[in-house]
Image: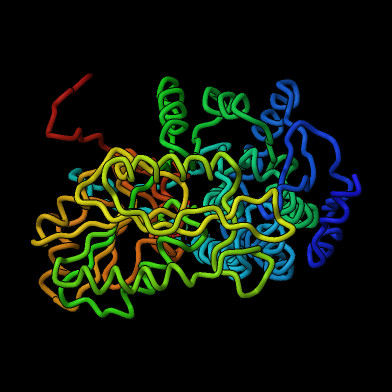
Amino acid sequence: MSAVAANAPAAAGSLAAVGFDLARLTAGDLESRSPVDGRLLGRVASLSRAEYDATLERSRAAFAAWRAVPAPRRGELVRLFGEAVRRHKPALAELITLEVGKIGSEAAGEVQEVIDICDFAVGLSRQLYGLTIASERKHHHMLERWHPLGPVAIITAFNFPMAVWSWNAALALVCGNPVLWKPSEKTPLTGLALHRLLESVLRDFPEAPAGLSALVPGGRAVGEWLAADERIPLVSATGSTRMGRDVAVKVAGRFGRSLLELGGNNAMIVAPTAAEDLAVRAITFAAAGTAGQRCTTLRRLFVHESRYEAIVARLKRAYASLKVGSPLATETLVGPLVDKAAYEAMQAALAQARAAGGVVHGGERVAIAGHDGGYYARPALVELAAPIEASARETFAPILYVFRYRELGEAIAANNAVVQGLSSSLITQNLSEAELFLSAEGSDCGIANINIGPSGAEIGGAFGGEKETGGGRESGSDAWKAYMRRQTQTVNYSSTLPLAQGVKFDVE
Ligand code: UN1
């Protein structure tokens, strides 16, 4: 396994202190290949059904203890974990670069999201507020209280292999729940490394019961076990709409809860008054950044006809000059696609666009010396007269479909005319246009932005989308409520028993 050892990143050495050593991860059915050059990084074993059941029993037992720990103490655990992530930020980021292919600053940004949500959750641990409600009955009062829910399963995708887990885990833990994590089969190593870090914090935290957090690596079978498992009241899943539909149906069949963050097909509208430099930067980062592999990636662009020629000419120049290459090189802006299948899906979508009369700029494979096993592609701009089947779905690659529009109403309708509803944006200096876009008659997405692109959300807001994006909300705002059960309580402090609605039921 010298290939593994030779690939071990320098900074990731610091993770050895928490028991993560790439060179020793040589056994198991889950192969982690680096998108950088296709090399084998390491292996992790899927859980067997017996191991899974034992893990679930530990998780259940952990719940009985953890729910009784005061929430601010639970927050203290998350604070310590956030501190550990801060200390290991370079190592964790380097691992993301290696296993996902993100450029350095985006990988560091992802680790920063983990830190940010930990900070958020620490504050939240003292703010799990309920309500007091006026009772219609004399000498009664009503309360709404939030209680822990139970083990929370978290299924994550390859593209944000740490941040999305942390949005769920940090909140679930302060809310009093154990967590179980199934990382993407493509990124078991980042999952293992971050989990080892959490385990190192748990070991030194006296109130943390054994089994409070568990990694449940595996393929589809493990996902199905989690979805079908009545011991798990909440399954939070990020990934494709197809996967989400399977999970949602299984979980609903047992009256469990699911929190889904699925496909996006995000649009931007560039209005007549748009600031050009801002628009070009916003478009390029949102469409080509992360090699087009964010749920929030910009995939459809509607440019007002009065600005179309100038904006497209600028974009062509910007796209042609984008540095595509190894994410380990500091000047690179666009790293590799995750694998060959992603590259082929990109090419298939471009072929369909060409066949439909679209004009394609870029999109070709870029050869990077010494990285033959990596799939690097120049981000593609596709000029289309009207939507096609490919522009209506999410291809996880840097393809931007560009359309002209005349009236804002028409562009908003086009923004909304897809089955996905994650993120959206409008570039304008016109207040009325901005307010219309943000109004009930505007964007139908979970996220709507003015003068920034659709990607790169902060953790403070609730993250998620409508329609086939799944409807879930993670991360900030009051997303924590999904991780707790609500109890309405009525207390009578009188010695009589008046009934609600004035009902009389007198007995001797
Ligand atoms: C995702 O792609 O699943 O808003 C998450 C963003 C990031 C998270 C994306 N903060 O682009």
Image quadrant holding the N terminus, namely: top right
**Is 433 rendered above or below residue 376?**
below
Q: Residue 288: image x %, image y %? A: 45, 62
Query: In the rendered image, is residue 248 in sight?
Result: yes
Query: In the rendered image, is residue 122 in sight?
Result: no
**Is 289 rendered above or below residue 176?**
below
Q: Which residue is rendered at x = 58% and y = 37% of the image?
A: 151
Would residue 356 be found to the left or right of residue 19 on screen? left
Q: Residue 412: image x %, image y %? A: 16, 56
Q: Which residue is rendered at x = 46% and y = 29% of the image?
A: 247
Q: Residue 98: image x %, image y %? A: 70, 57
Q: Nearer the viewer, residue 313 or 64?
A: 313
Q: Residue 455: image x %, image y %? A: 40, 61
Q: Nearer the viewer, residue 95 or 303?
A: 303
Q: Which residue is rendered at x = 52% and y = 60% of the image?
A: 290
Would residue 412 be found to the left or right of residue 147 on screen? left
